[in-house]
Amino acid sequence: MKKVITYGTFDLLHYGHINLLRRAKELGDYLIVVVSTDEFNWEQKRKKCYFTYEERKKMVESIRYVDLVIPETCWEQKVSDVKEFRVDTFVMGDDWEGKFDFLKEHCEVVYLPRTPEISTTQIKTNLGKA
């Protein structure tokens, strides 16, 4: 079984997220999605989420491409996650191109093109203008 892992906040879930998860799942048989906790988002990323971690986790779990959802609590956990879950492929959007190449000694690293016309940041900006 080929295992794939990806990471994200997945706040204000939209079709760009779904596209990423669908394409990630196409690269293997089992998709693990690591969702950033509220504490990690605030303390490390300085990002305030609209939905709580538990709400975001439930939404991501409901997507048919997703097999397992686990929490992301720190930047450094990626290597241990890849080893613990015996991951074959690590996937991120291409806005992170090159940032996770250090994982290549543990698994394949793939950067997928983002859905160009949608982003959570753009949604928040547009809602602020409404």
Image (spheres, rainbow, N blue to C red):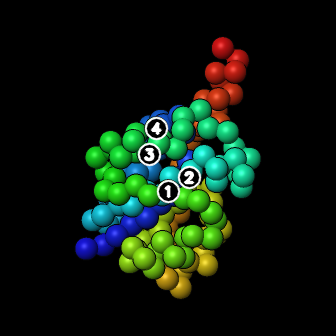
Q: Residue at x 56, y 52 (%)?
A: 36
The reply to whether callout 3 and callout 2 are in contact (CB within 8 Å) is no
Residue 126 visible in this rendered orientation of the protein: yes
User: What is the number of the mark on residue 36?
Assistant: 2
Looking at marks 2 and 4 on the same chain, the residue that comes earlier in the sequence is marked by: 2
Marks 3 and 2, how far apart at CA? 9 Å
For the residues labelled 3 and 1, say whether their Cβ atoms are less than 8 Å apart.
yes
- Tell whether label 4 touches label 3 (CB within 8 Å): yes
- Disc 2, SS: strand
Q: Residues within 10 Å of mark 2 (few under 14, many from 20)?
A: many
Q: Name which residue type carries label 1.
A: Pro
Q: Which mark is residue 57?
A: 3
Of helix, strand and loop, which one carries label 1?
Answer: strand
Q: Position of residue 71 (x, y in %)?
A: 50, 56
- Identify the secondary structure beneath mark 3: helix
Q: CA distance from mark 3 to mark 4?
A: 5 Å
Say whether residue 54 is left or right of residue 47: left
In the image, 68 versus 25, the foreground residue is: 68
Residue occupied by mark 4: 55
The type of residue carrying mark 2 is Ser
Mark 1 in CB contact with mark 4 (< 8 angstroms): no
Marks 2 and 4, how far apart in space?
12 Å
Circle on res. 71? 1
Which residue type carries mark 4?
Answer: Glu
The x and y percentages for residue 88 are 39, 76
